[in-house]
Amino acid sequence: MHRFTDTTHRRAFTLVEMLVVVAIISLLISIMMPSLGRARDQAKGVHCLARLKEFGIALASYENQNKDMLPPAEYEPDKEDETLKYGWCEPLWRFVYREHVFDLNRPILDPADGEPASFPVQRNLDRDRWEDYFVCRASAFQGPNSGHYRVYLPAWSASSYSIHDDGTFGDDTFPDPRQSVSRTAIRPKLPLIGDANERSERGDGLGNDDCSYIDAGEANYAGLNGDGNRFADRHMGGTNYLYQDLHADWNQALRGELAVDYDLNGIEDVDIVP
């Protein structure tokens, strides 16, 4: 009886072959990483546009129950305390989630000074409560005091601009952020809401910190300390906007156009001071 034996030998990879395989894998990863990074950025941009569209749906519902009027860009929730300010984010969040924001018995305090906080939802001061509803995932800054969306006041307040003397610079044109208007009064193609800088502070040194809007002249203006209230081009070099007709879209040139012609009426506006 013959016994057959397997005389084949299993040969292992040599060190050189292993190094070649590792080099090929490393090369493929280096080629794919930029594409993966762009895909991740595009996904964040799509999420941001979806969030803006959600704002549009919420605004339409809000208008249906409030005589076709937008929520004000700024108001005092406590009529006895004019220093406490809320903006459009607070009533919109309350409308969506049916939960009060302002409560005299349990006020939301500012972490800086322990006083009742202005624009608490806008600044995301209670993250366990409203999570990231007004926070853009593509923003580099995600901590407390984040507020990554602003209304564009020349559109939002529409015809509420009036001439008045501020006692310093003479007669200037200023909007009234407390004025609530109908979207029918807003010029088409103007943005209602857009990506804003990563921090809630306007940084203009005029006492208007942590507000919820961007004014004329601020669209392309960085503020005195570099953290001014302005639109941000954090999505592939462009900005996401929600427009007057409540559609959301990405635009790379609009920020610069608004800095020159704030109401898009075809006439360049000279020396707009934010």
Image (cartoon, rainbow, N blue to C red):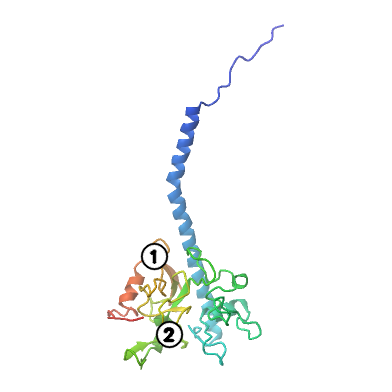
- Disc 1 to disc 2, C-alpha distance: 24 Å
Please give the residue where the numbered disc 1 appears in the rendered image: 238
In the image, residue 230 lies at what x, y percent? Answer: 40, 73
Q: Is residue 120 left or right of residue 232?
A: right
In this view of the protein, which residue sits in the foreground, 87 or 248?
87
Q: Amino acid at mark 1?
A: Gly
Outermost top residue: 1
Marks 1 and 2, the one that precedes in the sequence: 2
Q: Residue at x 54, y 83 (%)?
A: 64
Q: Amino acid at mark 2?
A: Ser
Please give the residue where the numbered disc 2 appears in the rendered image: 157
- The answer to which quarter of the image holds residue 229 is bottom left
In the image, residue 189 lies at what x, y percent? Answer: 38, 76
In the image, residue 21 lies at what x, y percent? Answer: 48, 33
Would you call the spot at circle 2 few (<14 residues within 10 Å), some (14-19), or many (20 or more)? many
Q: Compared to 30, does 170 lie above or below?
A: below
Q: Residue at x 47, y 71 (%)?
A: 199
Q: Is residue 121 left or right of residue 182?
A: right
Would you call the spot at circle 1 few (<14 residues within 10 Å), some (14-19), or many (20 or more)? some
